[in-house]
Amino acid sequence: MGPKDIVEFVDGALKLLSERDLWKPFLVVALTLSFGAFWIGWWLRRRSGAKLTCPARHLTPKEDALLANLDALNDALDKPEEELWQFRKTIVPRELLDRIHASKMKVLTLTNLKGGVGKTTLAANLAAYFHERDKRVLLIDFDFQGSLSTTVSRAARRTEATSESDKILTGRLSADNVASATFTLGGPLRHLSLIPAGYELNRQENRMLMRWLLGLDADDPRFALARLLAQERITKTFNLVIIDTPPRLTLATINALCASTHFVVPTILDDASIENVPALLRQVRHWFRDELNRSIELAGVVGTMTPRIDLGQTEERARDTVTRRAAEAWGPSTYIFNTSVPDNARFREDAGRTIAYLDTRATNSATRDVIDALGAETAERIGL
């Protein structure tokens, strides 16, 4: 089997492989079986210092690049998934990011590498807050579990939509389509648009990671969202983009951070949860702010799921700790929101069903007051 056959085999296997979350072992097996004696001979010659000799025909640039990257790829497969997205050094499309940051539109990502901290609840309620203030809001669900999509669709009394955010990553979602009425929810959320997620997002992320490792795509997949949001049709239509992300640095999360003007880190105020905050901030600082998205700003760290609105001694102690450690990780511009989001019955009951903030009855005034305070702080922090 020659290099051209290998390229075609691996490319053809990607679709099958993306159906399951077993891409690492499959890729190793596929590469090993595909190369067979050719790969073993090449590896032994390489280790002995001999030059690689090939059959009579010349390699194409694509084949030559694939062979040249095999050793590095083999080493990369032992690393955590987020590090795999640093496997290739590419030119950052500064002009796209400059266009986003120069526009009046703000892009806000909610992220934490720990799950169960209330990211989706915050995303939905902040969207409702800004919607009530006549802001044109685009919600992007970048978590393939689709909790935000379910919550917002039900709140708008609409049938749950199929996955669309995966089309952002593949470049199949046009700015004209996003800015049209296609994704507008209507009803009580008439100024809000949603790009929903589903399991197709996970399959595409797996597939595109493998293509990235093998160098099969010309465009950097980490900036697919930036390519969409930088278009004038988007920046002129929306005031705010809010992105919900999974508790992992997946391709979707990386796209969100590459395209964002600001990000928020929700965290439970306990010792176990706040451990993740400085680690995440260091990662965003060194990888994104220092390299991929130099203009990204931390809107703040917000305490969530507290026993009550007024913090107790345990939460205050955790807040003081995260304030100090977050500043060490991010720098002097670190901000901790004054507003904390309590773990009240209303937020719990409405999770996955509707958006608590939409209930304007007097019996829900305490919940709305919390979101009003958090929304006002957020608006000030991001300049909206």
Image (cartoon, rainbow, N blue to C red):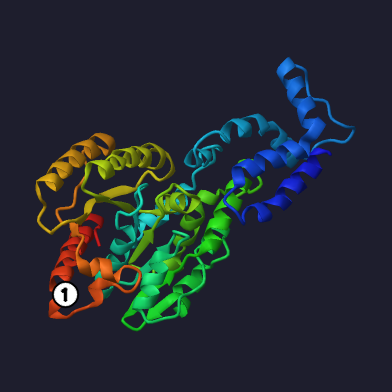
Q: Residue extending furthest top?
A: 48
Q: 269 above or below 365?
A: above
Residue 75 visible to the viewer: yes
Residue placed under numbered mark 1 in the picture: 364
Q: Is residue 192 above or below residue 207?
A: below
- Foreground: 111 or 169? 111
In the image, taking residue 369 as reference, residue 352 lies left or right, namely right
The x and y percentages for residue 94 are: 45, 47
> Residue 150 lies in what quarter of the image?
bottom left
Q: Residue at x 61, y 46 (%)?
A: 23
Identify residue type, mark 1. Answer: Asn
At which x and y percent is residue 369?
A: 14, 68
Name the residue located 20 percent from the left edge and 59 percent from the top edge: 341
Q: Quadrant of the N terminus?
A: top right
Q: Residue at coordinates 45% horizontally, 68% vertically from top-left?
A: 195
Percent x, y of residue 356: 25, 72
Q: Is residue 235 visible?
A: no
